[in-house]
Amino acid sequence: MRKFFNAKTPPSNPKVHPQFEAENELSMKDLFSHAISASLEDNLQIINKCFANCSDLKVIPWHYGPDLKYEASSVYFNTLTKSDPTNYFKDVLQNLVPHELGPTLDVTVEDVISYFEKNGVSSPLLELMDNIGQAIKGILDGKVVLFFTGWQKAVAYYAFDVEQRQTSEPISEPTVQGPHVSFIESLERNVGVIRSLLKSTNLKFEFFTSGKQVQRTLSYGYLDGVVKPETLNQFKQRIASIDQEEILDVSYLEEWIGDSLYSPFPQVRYTERPDTAITALLDGKIIAMVNGSPSILICPGNFMEFFTNSEDYYYRTIFSSLIRLIRVAAFIIALLLPSTYIALSNFHSELIPTVLLLAILNTREGIPFPAMVEALIMEFFFELLREAGIRLPRPIGSAVSIVGALVIGQAAIQSQIASPVMVIVVALTGIASFALPQYNMAIALRILRFPLMILAATFGGLGIMVGFILIYLHLATLRSLGEPYLDSLAPLDLKRVRDSIFLLPRRLLLHSPRNRHLYKKTSGRK
């Protein structure tokens, strides 16, 4: 190796070029307009200015050609690249000669320029760069950038090598039947998985970069001809203003996409499963991804879609429809059970059967708090246990949740802080909220539960009715990317509900997908 080129130790304190001494910060916009200099020293001074105090930046000088009189330098982050970037400089020189030995000693900078200017780049891992901004972004992307004296371009090799999580089962969407593959934190890998499973020329992915500091790569995909053009245009308009925002996760996009920022109901869905993302694309949805996030955002959101799961399509129709009915019942229980109990016990005790009423009164004997305060205390304890179970390590979290619930529940009953019936009501409410496939919908129920309890304690059944009507009016007026939130329920259309509360046989759904029929209907085509 030393016979062809020689590496020297980089200088410890490189001097900054006078052009940039007075500048405190170099913006990427200015750097992209600054061409690479023919002076190797000037280029390295700018690089060192931009990456000052970065100990993992490596600048390796090389000498090649007759009497080793020509200079070049490799610049890279050793924390982002493969362990042996030396080979990339060797590859550049050996592209110019037919054999490894001998002729390499005669390579001049004119040969380097002539070869790449005439032949261009043939390797997919190789890239030619014209300005300093491209070179700096390439270094941050895990590339080895080679600068040559006398040449106003740079050669970059893709050498990214950062350990990533291997594909595993979805954590937030476990399933018994169906694919057991999840997305990971690599955007390119996630897009590749979707393309490998949905091989269509109509599948479109568009990429852009956001943020001045993180420069995170974002992407959104859709099926051309299936997604509604109006919905796609609204989506593009809303994300057009986030190019300067520091987007760290795909959930950051929700505030830009959603129509109502203060609504407790989620207007987008999240998934870690490729089959769910593909189903959404076939249904005319738009998916959004962020590099570094294993979740995919699906929009626009529809109310009944938060009760569906990808596993529904892997079982028989009767069973899947029954499971969806159970989820709807769980939604109603999680929303109304505590407030209903408070209203019945305080205002409408005549509606409770006599035997049950006597049993409830017997268990509440000695309780110093009214039903409302009792419910608030137990709900607060349950929310604490829920958060503790989520934040603690997995082996400890489940034990703390189970033991804590048993201990606190039993202690509350024995100390007459809460009645057994209230403990049962709060426990059933929490279990019902866990039955919903989408966690963000369960969060909405946790928020709405308390106003309904206050209305029930104040006005009884009338308060629950008023609260329920207000929630329904909000849902009826809520939109997601301009689409009605209750689109599959109102106005009632049998063709819209065949994949909402009930699930028709797959041969009917696959023969005439819901979105395709609706798209033809709205676009006036037959």
Image (tube, rainbow, N blue to C red):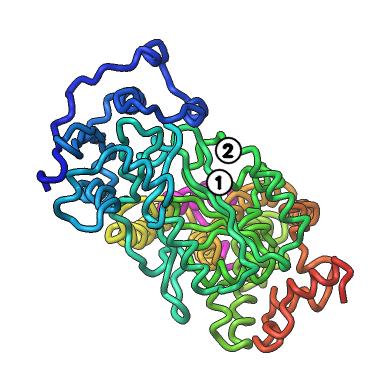
Separation (CA) of disc 2 from disc 1: 8 Å
Q: Which residue is mark 1?
A: 208
- Decide if residue 413 is in sight here: yes
Label 1 is placed on what type of residue?
A: Phe
Element at badge 2? loop
Residue 160: % across, % down: 32, 50
117 on left or right of 436: left
State whether residue 271 is above or below residue 206: below
User: Is residue 240 on the magenta stretch?
Assistant: no
User: Is residue 365 on the magenta stretch?
Assistant: yes
> Which residue appears at 28% of the width and 54% of the height?
163
Element at badge 1? strand
Nearest the camera: 109 or 502? 109
Q: Earlier in the sequence, mark 2 or mark 1?
A: 1
> Which residue appears at 66% of the width and 60% of the height?
340
> Which residue appears at 68% of the width and 46% of the height?
263
Q: Cβ–Cβ below 8 Å for labels 2 and 1?
A: yes
313 on left or right of 417: right
State whether residue 509 is above or below residue 412: below
Nearest the camera: 483 or 519? 519
Most common secondary structure along the magenta stretch: helix
Q: Which residue is mark 2?
A: 243
- Decide if residue 421 is in sight here: no
State whether residue 500 is above or below residue 35: below
Residue 402: % across, % down: 35, 62
Q: Magenta segment range? A: 357-385
- The disc label shown at residue 434, or none: none
Residue 266: % across, % down: 63, 53
Locate the C terminus by quadrant: bottom right
